[in-house]
Amino acid sequence: MRRSFFPHAPAFLHRFLLSAALVAGTAFAAVQAEAAPKTSVTIGMSVEPTGLDPTIAAPVAIGQVTWQNIFEGLTTVDRTGKVQPQLAESWEISPDGLTYTFKLRSGVTFHDGEVFDSSVARFAIERARGETSVNPQKRYFQTITSIETPDPQTLVLKLSKPTGSLLYWLAWPSSSIVGTRSAENNKTTPVGTGPFRFVSWAKGDRVELARNPDYWNKQGAARLERAVFRFMSEPQAQAAALQAGDIDAFPEFAAPELMQSFEGHERLVTVIGNTELKVVAGMNNARKPFDDKRVRQALMMAIDRNTLIEGAWSGFGTPIGSHYTPNDPGYVDLTGTYPYDPEKAKALLAEAGYGNGLAFTIKAPQMAYAQRSSQIMQAMFAEIGVTMNIETTEFPAKWVSDVFKGADYEMTIVAHAEPMDIDIYARDPYYFNYGNPDFNAVLDKVQLTSDAAEQAVHYGEAQKILAGDVPALYLFVMPKLGVWDRKLKGLWENEPIPSNVLTEVYWEE
């Protein structure tokens, strides 16, 4: 028989007291839930990665999900942009700069249990630099002539010539250390040594990660139990998801015109930081009329960068005159090399034989910044008698196929996200089809020294050559526009490398 605590109370009182107890219990549970800090986070991204292995494909969205979360390197880059030890705890460089000896960490295992040692590190580097490699930054490993593994905790790289940027390059997502057993399947089921393990990928929607309980760095272990990356390309939907609390953070919010809508919000904050996102309108220097430097210079003078930034990105951005950002060592402000001057632009076009104007097509990705910038440039070019047709090109697949790999284009526009990537103009081939031996010689000087001050001087020289030759129209650097819950701490405000590092992220109590 069920016993009542109020044996003489009428039935309606029993029901009242039971309801009150249930309400009180629910309220108590709610208070407990509110008091306990959250252990999961949902991060919004505008672009879904094409795969999850940053060592075999170029799109930055891959590293924004996996770098420092799933995958790690011999070295890493911290939130200030400085190189730090990671799977290599220390290193020595020979006086001639041709031998790098790394002392590797012990006690490191991959998420599938494989032990990390020098043989695994050698495998990962050989895979990245081999003949059949599809590594997006294969050039980083070109000067490595041999790899030695005298013992499990020692890795020796022998170089053909000094490579002053090697430690920095080894920190990149494309240089991530992959396991011998798992590398083949990392594109869909990534396995690394990082603080988070891969759980699932619902294509078109999300990637889910979980904390790695066996992470080697106990002091740097993740504080979150779970992390979800949600993919949402439409800016209005991004804003709505943030407002509703369906997404905790959009570290790279794609609608600058909506940033003001979050001002004074009781739960959300806006954060404006620095990035390496250089918006440039690349030209196919091997095709007419862009094979004539005077045409490229005239088009540069037809652009009012400040007006373009206001119209394309709501005034958020910094004008640039070369392929370099103010965050980088040796930056030189070269926006005055070919400043806005439509009349001089017309005269230069006439000198080049295009006094009656010219016409061409720009292949512009569907992203808002590219479309808006193209439309504004179209109007500015019309002022000097130039007709630019806009062809929307799906990014990344179609753009990578047609422009990046095929160089089948006249003009394009894209935000180059890789830091310190001014050396792309020395690549042969590369989609700009630009070549200047003087420029290449300056970049060679950068690698001949590891002295930061000396490197900065050479980087300044390289910037000036590009500003004069104008192989691309240098427009502006996009800032990092972040919107996230004010109780969410540890996200990177600036972006020295494209990433969403979650190791230090936690919820404030």
Image (cartoon, grey):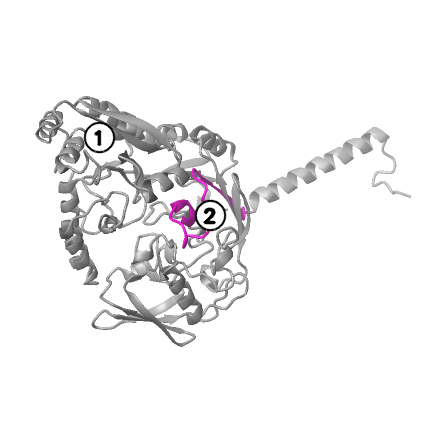
Residue 175, given in percent of the width and then of the height, sits at 37, 58
Q: Are marks 2 and 1 in contact (CB under 8 Å)?
A: no
Residue at the image point whose x is 45% and y is 71% from the top:
106
Residue at the image point whose x is 38% and y is 60% from the top:
128
Residue 93, given in percent of the width and then of the height, sits at 26, 70
Asked if residue 41 lies in the magenta stretch, the reply is yes
Front in this rendered view, residue 87 or 383 = 383
Instruction: Name the residue carrying label 1.
Output: 306
Relative side of 119 to 361, left or right: right
Front in this rendered view, residue 251 or 97 = 97
**Main structural element of the magenta stretch: helix, strand or loop?**
loop
Extreme bottom residue here?
Answer: 150
Three-letter amino acid code at the position of disc 1:
Asn
Residue 162, given in percent of the width and then of the height, sits at 22, 65
Q: Which of the 4 quarters of the picture holds residue 399? A: top left
Q: Which of the 4 quarters of the picture holds residue 172? A: bottom left
Residue 17, given in percent of the width and then of the height, sits at 77, 34
> What stretch of residues is rendered in magenta?
37-63
Q: Earlier in the sequence, mark 2 or mark 1?
A: 2
Position above or below: 126 against 481: below
> Can residue 164 be seen from the camera position used here?
yes
Q: Which of the 4 quarters of the picture holds residue 408? A: top left
Instruction: Name the residue carrying label 2.
Output: 51
Extreme right residue here?
Answer: 1
Relative side of 317 to 202, left or right: left
Q: Which mark is residue 453?
A: none
**SS at mark 1 in the image:** helix
Marks 2/1: CA–CA distance: 36 Å
Three-letter amino acid code at the position of disc 2:
Gly
> Can residue 314 be seen from the camera position used here?
no
